[in-house]
Amino acid sequence: MKSKRITLFLAIVLFALAIVSPAELAFAKGSSAQDYLYIDPGAGASSTPMELIAFNASMGPSSSKWKSVDKTSLPALENFRFEYNAAKNKLPEGAKNALTDESFVAELDGLIAKSRKTFPKSFKVLSIGNSFSVDAVKYLYKVAKSAGAKEIVVASMHITACDIKSHRINAENDFPVYKYKKNKNGKIKSLSNVSILSALRDENWDYVTLQQSSNLSGVEKSYNNDLNFMANYILKNRPCPSTKLCWHMTWAYSKKYENDSFEVYDFNQQNMYDTTCSAVRSKIVPNKSFSVLIPVGTAIQNLRTSYIKDRLNRDGRHLNAIGQYTAALTFVRSLGYDIDNIEWTPKSKKLSKAYLPAIKASVNDSLCVPLSVTNESRICNHKATKDSPFNTVVENPGRPATCESSGYSNSSYCRVCKEVIKQQRMIPRLSTHNFLFRIRTPATMKADGTRTGTCKVCGKIKNQIIPMIKSVSLSKSVYAYSQKPVTPKVTITDRTGNLLRENTDYTLSYPDSHISVGKHKIEVVFKNKYKGKSGLEFKITLS
């Protein structure tokens, strides 16, 4: 029984070591974590010890992956830590809790801290390619500056649609046929008719990047001897021994692109991406001349799975501001800098800071798994933007509470992941109405009047009719002389039978002497809701 357990243990270790090819491990020395196949424990995993054994065999201090990492290279160390944490997070909770890696993590952090002190302050990058290189480094200077780089020099030399074979011809003959643009500490210089050799000798470059023409990026046979020649030529003529050669992986065209150059990929974006990955895996990864892979193509393809979708090209082939910014972040991240705290974005109507979570996730994931797409649909910014095509927030307007009914607050949710951003809540009924009326037309003895009331609590408007005055009468019209003043009672009603109130709706004026025998008049003057006058008469007799 004991021998069976030992055999099982050895089989698991050998399997874990076998899933990582030496070619893929080679890139760990340069900078980025390459196309590494993690062991996904899955939701139904039940054997925690086996998962930990596999994890430690593939990522632990005794693993081939860790042993192959250049312990003096800050990019290599930081990218290994990024990849280590990503693999660790995939472990089930039970396996994660059982993992005792504190000393190893402390060792890794110590190496990173030591390497960071000696990390070069300069960021000098020369990109050799075509218009795709120009797109990729358009915002590289500002992004590198935002990432904390010093002594920044970003240069691109290009010929439109130039492939590796054409670069070889130009290099062999030292043809001065390139456009050369250099941004040195914010000062831009543009030249024409520059050769590859003269550009290589123009600065002490930290990195030199090379790329294949986009239409040939997925055609493996287009690399061959031309690639080896260019790699050897650049390394032979590099200005200093520390200059590293990087491979710039280009992106697939937009799904809507209809140019003939897309025909080789059957006008299929996924096919173009897959064949490009295949070419990089077979032609670049095993090539020891290349120290760093810059997986712009994967970062772009990752971002296309997010809510931004396939909106990264300006003409179906070249990148727009969103794509160019993503490419620059990929360059900086591949060369060992942290991008999580970068807030700078170019001023463009197409690019909002609200897109940063998806962009950064796409870039970081491309460094973790550079030759495979990571679904970023889970990444939402949950923010309303001015650009309606990218607006992920659906707003549901609420309704204010009134004196008659309860209301509810505004609410919103993300139309991508359906997460409720602002919960709707009920607003209780305010109170009973308390109207303050304003007379618009007073009522008279001939016509109705009108008045408008506004509720002081909820603001509701209420219009009312003021019924016209129907009758004005005395309680008694003949009185016997009694040597005392006579004041008959006046009764006034409107057409609905309601009594009008003295001193509120009308006033009465009696004669100065209403004791003596004879006829006397009473004057009625209407006010407030009513308008007009009326006269009444009564008599005082001797008998």
Image (tube, rainbow, N blue to C red):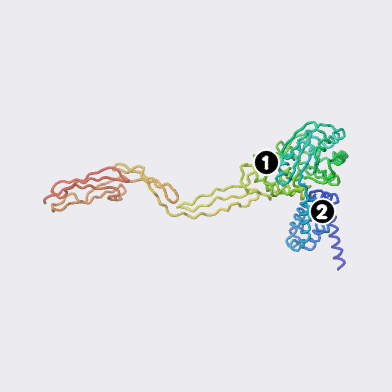
- Circle 1 residues within 10 Å: few <14, some 14–19, many ≥20: some
- Circle 2 residues within 10 Å: few <14, some 14–19, many ≥20: some
The answer to whether 168 is drawn above or below residue 399 in the figure is: above
> What distance separates the C-alpha of mark 1 from that of mark 2?
35 Å
Residue depicted at 81% across the width and 31% down the height: 177
In the image: residue 146, left or right of residue 516 = right
Quadrant holding the N terminus: bottom right
Query: Residue 486's x, y, as percent?
Result: 18, 51
| Near-viewer residue (414 or 193) | 193
| Near-viewer residue (31 or 3) | 31
User: Would residue 382 be seen by someone viewing this image from the given angle?
Assistant: yes
Farthest left residue in view: 542
The answer to whether 66 is drawn above or below residue 209 in the figure is: below
The secondary element bearing badge 1 is classed as loop
Query: Residue 479's x, y, as percent?
Result: 16, 51
Quadrant in the rendering for residue 321: top right
Tally the marks. 2
The answer to whether 386 is drawn above or below residue 433 in the figure is: above
| Near-viewer residue (495 or 228) | 228
Identify the residue position indicated by label 1 in the image: 346
In the image: residue 375, left or right of residue 527 = right
Specify the label residue 71 is tagged with. Answer: 2
Q: Amino acid at mark 1?
A: Pro
Query: Residue 194's x, y, as percent?
Result: 80, 33
Q: Amino acid at mark 2?
A: Lys
